[in-house]
Image (spheres, grey):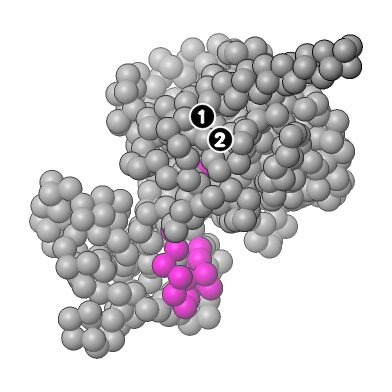
Amino acid sequence: MLDANLKTQLKTYLEKVSRPIELIASLDDSARSQELLALLNDIASLSDRVVVIERRGDTERKPSFSIGEPGKDTGIRFAGIPMGHEFTSLVLALLQVGGHPVKLDEPVIEQIRNLEGDYRFETYFSLSCQNCPEVVQALNVMALINPRIRHVAIDGALFQNEVEARQIMAVPTMFMNGEVFGQGRSGVKEILAKLDSGAGARAAKELEKKPVFDTLIVGGGPAGAAAAIYSARKGIVTGVVAERFGGQVLDTLAIENFVSVKETEGPRFATALEQHVKSYEVDIMDVQRAEALVPGRIHEVRLANGAVLKAKTIVLATGARWREINVPGEREYRNHGVAYCPHCDGPLFKGKRVAVIGGGNSGVEAAIDLAGIVREVTLIEFGAQLRADEVLQRKLRSLANVTIVTQAQTTEITGDGKKVDGLVYQDLRSGEPKRVELEGVFVQIGLVPNTEWLKGTVELSKHGEIVVDAKGATSVPGVFAAGDVTTVPFKQIVIAVGEGAKASLGAFDHLIRHSVEEEATADSEEAVLAG
């Protein structure tokens, strides 16, 4: 099952295991069960601390397996064959069950341990989804820490009957005690915030104790990370407050244009960013959403939980999110046929009919990828021509199951109340409405800046971007901005990183100049008083 290279890597990891591990496999006579058994036997062959036990008469999903110590159920189970992006989740579960320390702060571990109640989680994932592993790994480690938490990670492509029955059309999708708990990327802290009703109030109380920062960065994407590093290297008091560290990068599959890094994946890149920032004395406050900026001699950032952070200078790096088409049905059927990530959700539409809205590089790439999975792809483009690179257009036009529709304006996404069943567009040449019968719609029309909370505070462009000068300064003295949230053209990771560094240096320059001015004013006042 595992090739020689993977076996070598895994053997090295399993040398860190200090406790015996039982892999209890629930199997039937299917080919997939045989594949799973082969994988588990390969793992067991690499360590004398790992044993495989087969069960065929139990009521568990088949194929599936649990990971635990002998005679001790840790509540961790995989339903399916965790390869692809989930292979890392499998390796981490093996190491953690086998005694390798969990990489969580002690207060977080205690919070998990002290949760009251019994929680039975089920996570539906796709092997091609780069967001799913964080959810799977978070719930696995929580199940390991708290025996009242149980988690099953389920390959949606393998258990299609469940996916259909539960109307799952986006991954990751989490169920808790049989009810939908959440969709999309979530880490331990985000999950805890939903489970622990008092977490927000406690966090707010702790945040209120924070000192006045020299520079506070709002946002944890590439621009925010670069700003934090450049600020911390100056030896000043630096903080980062963010909803999720990594930002939009977390939703990116392949990164092949970051200078010096031939290729990587978004989540891996985001982890590297966070590790780099943590190597400096930076106060990272994550799972926090900014709601207001109050400028002043000392600026204030008000958070959703009620806490207020104070800083002498601010760097705004809140990035951007998927742009919506804002037509009837889009929000109603989000995650029920309307999707924004073809890599994550594409496998759930295997054999179905889908539309891709957007003829730029992202839209055409999505259509190409989906064409290898789904039955039919209809690409909808508003303009008279596709805007993607010519090489991508040639590839797209070569695919037999792709239909390209230009000069078409999407006017409605329709459904039966539970899931999408079609799309209506206006033919801009004839003016006639036309309908496409389908099961999924992937929206790929670019990004929109996260600036709603800044309206009326800093100058924004007509597109909602923060207006900045050559140094990253905004219309408010002492407030700087960087990355996709600004008017800087060409929204690329490498550009965001550079802009983050520049904004941080601009903030530092402001601090120095402001400090000199204050000292000069103080000296002048003392001279007057002395005279």
In the image, is residue 333 part of the stretch drawn in magenta?
yes
Camera sees residue 269? no
* Residue 397 place in picture, x, y as percent: 12, 58
* Residue 479 place in picture, x, y as percent: 60, 36
- x 67%, y 57%: residue: 181
- Indicate the amino acid at tag 2: Phe
Q: Is residue 177 left or right of residue 186?
A: right
Query: Which quadrant of the figure has residue 348?
Result: bottom left
Q: Quadrant of the C terminus?
A: top right
- Which residue position is annotated with label 2? 480
Q: Is residue 322 left or right of residue 364?
A: right
Which residue occupies the extreme front position in the image?
531
Query: Which quadrant of the figure has residue 25?
Result: top right
Q: Observer-nearest residue: 138 or 471?
A: 471
The CA distance from mark 1 to mark 2 is: 6 Å
* Residue 291 place in picture, x, y as percent: 69, 50
Q: Observer-nearest residue: 91 or 265?
A: 265
Q: How many marks?
A: 2
Q: Quadrant of the N terminus?
A: top left
- Indicate the amino acid at tag 1: Ala
Which residue occupies the extreme bottom position in the image?
432
- x 28%, y 81%: residue: 426
Q: Is residue 405 above or below residue 118?
A: below
Magenta stretch mostly in which secondary structure? loop
Q: Is residue 492 left or right of residue 293?
A: left
- Which residues make up the magenta segment? 319-337
* Residue 437 place in picture, x, y as percent: 32, 79
- Which residue position is annotated with label 1? 503
